[in-house]
Amino acid sequence: MTALHPTPTPTTAERATGLHAGDPLADAVVAELDLLGAPAQRALDVGLRGGLASLHEPAPEAVAALLRQLESTPPGVDPLMAHRGDVVSLSVPPLWFGLCSITGTLAHTYASPAVAGRLVRAGSPAVMAPRRLAGAGVWARQTMRPGGLLRGAPGYLGTVQLRLLHARIRLTAFEREGGAAEGGASAWNTFARRRPPTGQDDPARTWLGLTLVSFRALAAVGIEIDPDEEHSLYRYWSYVAHLLGLDETLYGNVLDHADAERLRALLDARTAAPDDNSRALTTAMVDAQARAMAGAPGAVLSEEHLRYLIHSVLRQSFGDETADLLGVPVPAATHLMPLIGKLNRQSRYWQTFSPASSGEARRRALDGPGPELIAAVLPVGTATGHRSREGERSGAPAA
């Protein structure tokens, strides 16, 4: 395997600059969709599914530029990787992936008061929590599946949708500050010059959520990966970062958890402490996940026990200080977590003992999103591909 990026490791200052960079390609596409309407929308949809070469007429300038960037292959990426999928994440049993990875990722997102404030303004935390759990779980599974990141596949489309949603959020924040009062193309020119300070914080937080944060949470229940698996994980997610539009200085030399921790520290240094909105969203998310998993077919744990497990995982993976700020209570003293960790370590040993056992673990993960995600998806119809209001405005295809 070729090294991911044989380039010098970016300095902290270079990565800080990358966080400020924003995503000019996605910003320009959202501008073009607003200005040109249906023709640009059709060109984007067709191009994302069939590629730039599949368009019968020249695409609008910004749409064409985005498609060219998406269709380029970052240096060092194995062309067969997308066909195999994220073999490391797919080795995790679906129940633990939902309980640890998805809840940890969302809690990491909600820890940003800027993100939490936007989400609370969009709807009641208790009402929206199942929908957000379902959306995060479905996108993650689609992204990880073999072939999921191939052009036109659900993971590819969902990742670009998320990228354009972040661009729409940047514009909305700019408009809220009165920056687009003049309207039209002039407003977008002003936006390009005065890009909001959030830059790439939101997509970087999402990316870290399903890599570093996810596996820190899994480690809390005894599901750990070795150095080779870490490298494989970050090689795969470097391509996800490319599709998300992350600046290469942020992810290009992130090869393992230690590298990712440095990026996370830089991101956290730019982020205010969790606030009341963060706590409301985290509480609603934990309640929704425990309720969905307890009510899933074949569930063996009560909602109370599942809530305890999620609280324990969050406290161990985030640390007491951040967990306190997120409003995660201290579970009652028990020996349940050490026992779960021991059983999972034994189980993972046999799952990864041979290529055959590893393949069987991945096959089971691919059989479906897991009962806890199905239970979360069905009430809100996320699995049918309905777009959110912001997703519709972004012009991206439904995940």
Image (spheres, grey):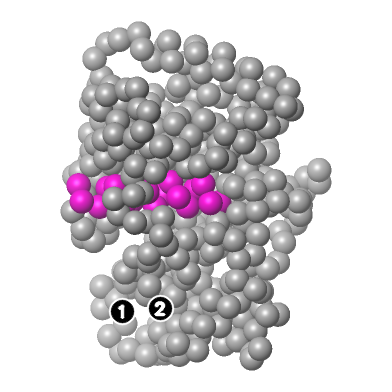
Q: Residue at x 55, y 36 (%)?
A: 365
* For residue 140, side relative to residue 306 (left or right): right
* For residue 74, side relative to residue 325 (left or right): right
Q: Nearer the viewer, residue 13 or 126?
A: 126
Q: Residue at x 39, y 44 (%)?
A: 374
| Magenta span contains residue 149 | no
Q: Which residue is mark 2?
A: 191
Give the residue type at disc 2.
Phe
How far separated are the C-alphas under marks 2 and 1? 7 Å
Q: Residue at x 37, y 28 (%)?
A: 298
Where residue 259 appears, as percent x and y from the top left, is 59, 38
Give the residue type at disc 1.
Gly
Where residue 17 appears, as percent x and y from the top left, is 53, 59
* For residue 90, side relative to residue 266 (left or right): right
Q: Main secondary structure of the magenta part?
A: helix
Q: Which residue is mark 1?
A: 179
Q: Give the mark nearer the N terminus: 2 vs 1.
A: 1
For label 1, count other residues whose C-alpha is less than 10 Å away and answer few (under 14), some (14-19) or many (20+): some
Judged from the image, the secondary structure of the residue bearing numbered disc 2 is helix
Marks 2 and 1 in Cβ contact (< 8 Å):
yes
Looking at this view, name the residue that lies furthest to the right: 1
Residue bounds of the magenta highlight: 126-143
